[in-house]
Amino acid sequence: MFKIVGYLAAALLIALSLFAVRYSDKFSPTALIPGVEGILLAVFISLAIFTKRHKLWMHVALGVVLLFLIAGIGRLASSGFDLSAFAGQMVAIMSAINIAFLILAIRSFLHARRKPKA
């Protein structure tokens, strides 16, 4: 389940970045931040699938998402949680995707830990 949720979150973040670049009034390189996060997340999920050190890469993926979440919430807090601007809305959506991914990933980790080994 972690892998499916990870790829879905990565796709949503990349789509959010493309949407922000396309529909913003003027181009800003910071609109690419969700896309960078999505690409990093997809790479780390792929490493978790295709290498023997899958636990390491899953935790690295969670760490990346957590860092971007902290940065996003910090950005929102510095603006006084003003969601009237386009950039504030994009940061709020990115943070919501990160929160959802973290919750589902932690649930997946707990479920895998409780599952008895054969």
Image: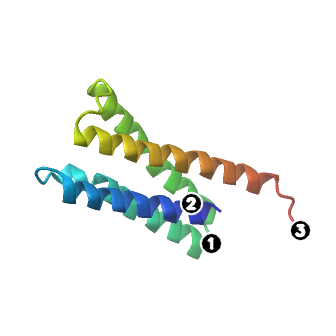
What residue is shown at x 68% (from left), y 54% (from top)?
108
Q: Secondary structure at mark 2?
A: helix
Q: Secondary structure at mark 3?
A: loop
Residue 112, given in percent of the width and then of the height, sits at: 75, 57
Q: Is residue 74 visible?
A: yes
Q: Earlier in the sequence, mark 3 or mark 1?
A: 1
Location of mark 2 (residue): 5
Instruction: Give the residue type at disc 3.
Output: Ala
Up-down relation of residue 20 to residue 42 (above or below): above
What residue is shown at x 64% (from left), y 47% (from top)?
106
Location of mark 3 (residue): 118
Q: Are marks 3 and 1 in contact (CB under 8 Å)?
A: no
Q: Quadrant of residue 21?
A: bottom left
Q: Residue furthest left?
A: 26
Q: Nearer the viewer, mark 3 or mark 1?
A: 3
Instruction: Give the residue type at disc 2.
Output: Val
Residue 66, given in percent of the width and then of the height, sits at: 47, 44
Q: Nearer the viewer, residue 53 or 85?
A: 85
Location of mark 1 (residue): 52
